[in-house]
């Protein structure tokens, strides 16, 4: 059984969801692992990993709208020195995921037909975000 | 160290929580693994995995009530062609979990006394849902 | 490739976030694993694991305030025999995480600069909470 680790750097353009399923599958393919486990870990506290519908982009707009309303920027947060979008970004991160695991079979991620892997940027401005991809298997 | 993978198919009856702890423990037992890690991965974007209290069924009713209020079906979602319960199901999935990991010791899932493993159906109608169980250990 | 398992017992003082990053890193160091995966699993349904900002404690106060408002104690929950804070604790657990995975490189958790590992107590009174740390690697 072997390990294979790679850090993906993903550029975001402010509050939005970026699909990077293909990049993760490429790491799986490079690793040569046929049966195993793919772990994703996001190294930030103001963005999230999300596994969501990969077909209709309206789903992504509704998700963003819902979270923007659920965690408003105009609240009186104590932590506000980094801008009105900073504390909401931390809260949105707490409500979603920082790590995900996807089993691998026959060298492919075992995602469902409609599942895509997304990086969800919660800040107003774009950032370069690091996702550790850790492959374990044989 | 060995891998063992199995896909469980779980029939749901619409919005509700179905406990399947015993089915997961059966896969662990079948695998013969004594010390290791059990990964669960749900292959859908309108249902969730949840580890929750296994004793009082009222907890499950309160959970369902809370999420139904938090993510109402009568909102003006952009994505609405698949029915009023579809977009809320995607949002509920984003707020909960698609993958879970449970360590194994002495051939048993290391769940706490009050923890059960649930599949949470977020759609109004029943579906057959696939959960990948991936066991790794020796 | 080897496994290493240890159960951490963490005392809480009621609703609040306790950082225990150093305790997890100590287990990683003890295990001798240089490249691998660290899995954390919380054995409770009224507390959560959270990976969050490790710098400004105001972030933790805002997080607690937000969740206290989002999941109020004065709602008419069906499950209420264990006190007004019990059902909200279960809901807060459903909205956050019970398991987390952090890759290991060069014998160190691959956390981002600003990431800390927290145990989030959701009950009014203090408890001793068990977190299973499972290290896998070589």
Image (spheres, coloured by chain):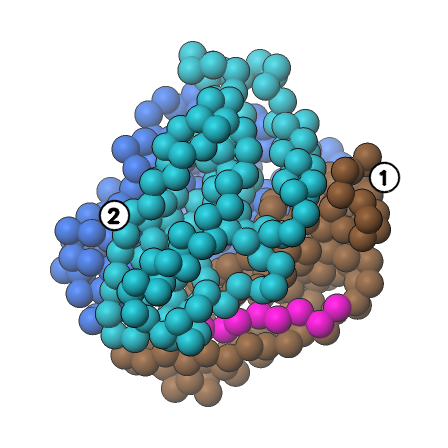
Chain colours: A blue, B cyan, C brown
Disc 1: which chain? C
Residue C34 on image: x %, y %: 35, 80
Which residue position holds label 2? Answer: A109
Query: Does the magenta segment cover residue B95?
Result: no
* Mark 1 crowdedness (10 Å alpha carbons): few <14, some 14-19, many ≥20: few
Residue C26 on image: x %, y %: 52, 83
Counting the numbered discs, the total is: 2
Q: Which residues are magenta?
A: C127-135
Q: Image check: A87 left or right of B7?
A: right
**In the figure, residue C136 lies in which quadrant?**
bottom left
**In the figure, residue A69 lies in which quadrant?**
top right
Which residue position holds label 1? Answer: C74
| Residue plotted at (44% across, 26% down) | B126
In the depicted structure, whether residue C31 falls above or below residue C13: below
Q: Image check: C32 left or right of C90?
A: left
Question: Element at badge 2?
Answer: strand
| Residue plotted at (47% across, 22% down) | B125
Distance between the Cα atoms at labels 1 and 2? 44 Å
């Amino acid at each position: 059984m072997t390990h294979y680790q790679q850090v993906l750097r993903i550029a975001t353009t402010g509050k939005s969801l970026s699909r990077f399923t293909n990049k993760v599958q490429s790491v799986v393919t490079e690793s040569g692992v046929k049966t195993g486990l793919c772990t994703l870990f996001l190294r930030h506290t103001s963005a999230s990993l999300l596994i969501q519908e990969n077909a209709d982009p309206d789903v992504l707009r509704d998700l963003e709208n819902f979270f923007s309303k659920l965690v408003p920027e105009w609240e009186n947060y104590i932590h506000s020195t980094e801008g009105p979008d900073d504390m909401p970004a931390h809260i949105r991160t707490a409500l979603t995921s920082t790590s995900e695991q996807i089993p691998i079979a026959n060298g492919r991620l075992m995602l469902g037909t409609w599942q895509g892997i997304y990086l969800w940027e919660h800040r107003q401005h774009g950032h370069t975000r690091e996702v550790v991809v850790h492959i374990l298997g044989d």
